[in-house]
Amino acid sequence: MTTLKYKSWPFKEAQKLLKRFPEPPNIPVRFETGFGPSGMPHIGTFAEVARTTWVRHAFEFLTQWPTQLITFSDDMDGLRKVPLNMPQQEMLAENLGKPLCHIPDPFAERESYSAYMNNKLNEFLDSYKFDYTFQSSYEAYTRGDFNDGLAIILQKVEDVKAIILPTMSAEKRVSWSPFFPICEKCSRINSTRVIDYHPENNTIDYICDREEGLVKSCGHKATASILNGNVKVGWKIDWALRWYSYDIGYEMYGKDLIESAKLSGKIVRLMGKQPPIGLFYELFLDEEGRKISKSVGKGLTIDSWIGYAPLESLLYYIFQNPKQAKRLFWGIVPKSVDDYLAGLNNYEILDLEKQPDSTIWHLFNKGKMVPSYRTSTNFSLINNLISAVGADDIDLIIEYLKRYDSSLEKFATIIEDLVQKAMNYYRDFILPNKKYRTPNKEEKKMLKKLRDELAEYRGNDENELQSIPFNVARMFNESPKNFFQLFYEVIFGQERGPRFGTFVQLVGKDKALSLLDTVCSI
Ligand SMILES: [Zn+2]
């Protein structure tokens, strides 16, 4: 294999994966992501599928081999506590401890709790046009996909325990088993404990007497086959079982699962195969730097992001170094959009061979159908314009923009979408935080002078326009920094804003003069 010429992280991951294969395998190279259907898919689910897709694409680009992305749903897991944001709390409490696939759908739309969530996941991934193969754990178990692996785990049950038990507290070790049978009488999975193993005929004996939290038990005692969905294995073993049974080549995971991944790696080796290649990524944090909990439906969802900014700007943000913790809150929207637009602007002039290292190439499926956007007009500029002229009239904003930059006609679709979203963003996040300053007498004099100097200037050169406020500040012995702050606070209701020259060109001299007239006459 030649040395890797691409430096972006998906290519580095793809290269790591390539080292596993001395020659092309006879099945597609498999990538996997995980989903816990106890709750709705969220931004973490989305980011994991997106990031895995980028590695997959880089790998396809390097090898031209067939690949597959399996999105695996743990729908045989037991429901351990009733999620607060779900309807039918009593019904759910009654079903605590049962596998999610055997609990009724609290929304009464699908055949089970997890079927509802799985459907949400699929809708969600489809709406963003991900290419994936969905796999339900329940279906995989009952179909027998895991039977060979389960038999090996039963054969080696003592070795598996020797790997897992040292990581558990003393009291949990006593009754722990890698196997979790579903009680044939009460259908609970979190209430049973294994009392004997029979590897010779793939069965175990169990008793339903475990009391864990609010999960009830029924006292039933029975023998169960470990095959075809009567029994599942605990989750670290489950992870290894999937890797083993589906020959997963690549899977990434959140930083909170580093230890689990190590243990699952040991178990899959014990079973006779290699764990997948993968990297751990840092988790998303909220504005204060706290971990975003999936159970708490925080305001920022992908659906709402799309109302304020293009989806690609979120992807652009997610793409940047997965090993760096990312804060996810509304304040990052303008910079994310501007970074994305700058990337788009730069993409067309990149050498062909450099394009695969651009985030844009990864965002648009190996550089396919990248939209043309060759202008410096960005989200911040549009927001500044809206601040100056108001947020009510989309056509007016677009008219201003076209006057400012006549080339925008060519990118009309992107611009219209941006303006619409910027208006939403302005209304919901900028406007409520504005604090307009009323200038005092001396300050009014300075602003009046600025108005008069601008009125007298006959040209339209950005740098010459920019020099006007500097000259005025000098005349009044004021620092330019303070004078600009005054200008922004009075005109925009914020501490910072666009360059004065840009502002005048953007709104036009007449509008700039009338804005200054208004504040001087307050
Ligand atoms: Zn039971």
Image: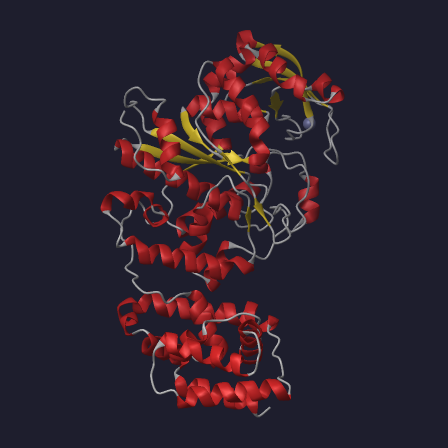
| Residue nearer the viewer, 200 or 131 | 131
Scheme by which the image is coloured: secondary structure
> How many labels were placed on the picture?
0
Question: Is 224 on the left-hand or right-hand side of 409?
Answer: right
Vertical position of residue 91 compared to residue 29: above or below: below
Q: Give the quadrant of residue 418.
A: bottom left
- Is 64 situated left or right of 251 in this image? left
Left or right: residue 88 versus residue 399 is right
Residue 194 x %, y %: 66, 17
Q: Is residue 18 above or below residue 334?
A: above
* Quadrant the C terminus occupies: bottom right
Residue at 47 percent of width and 19 percent of height: 147
Is 271 in front, or is 479? 479
- Asked whether residue 232 appears in the rendered view, the answer is no
Position above or below: 202 against 392: above
Q: Nearer the viewer, residue 356 or 250?
A: 356
Q: Nearer the viewer, residue 111 or 299?
A: 299
Instruction: List x then y, in percent, for residue 392.
Output: 47, 80
- Locate the N terminus by quadrant: top left
User: Which of the 4 image quarters holds residue 502?
Assistant: bottom left
Q: Residue at x 36, y 22 (%)?
A: 20
Residue that sits furthest to the left in the current view = 352
User: At x 48% / y 77%, what residue is drawn?
Assistant: 470
Q: Residue 233 in the image: state x and y as whole percent.
A: 57, 23
Which residue in the rendered view is the most extreme toward the bottom? Answer: 521
Give percent across and percent down for residue 274: 44, 19
- Where 443 sits versus 221, above or below? below
Q: Quadrant of residue 509?
A: bottom left
> Which residue sits at x=60%, y=84%?
443
The picture quadrant for ligand 1 comes to top right
Left or right for 23, reference 328: left
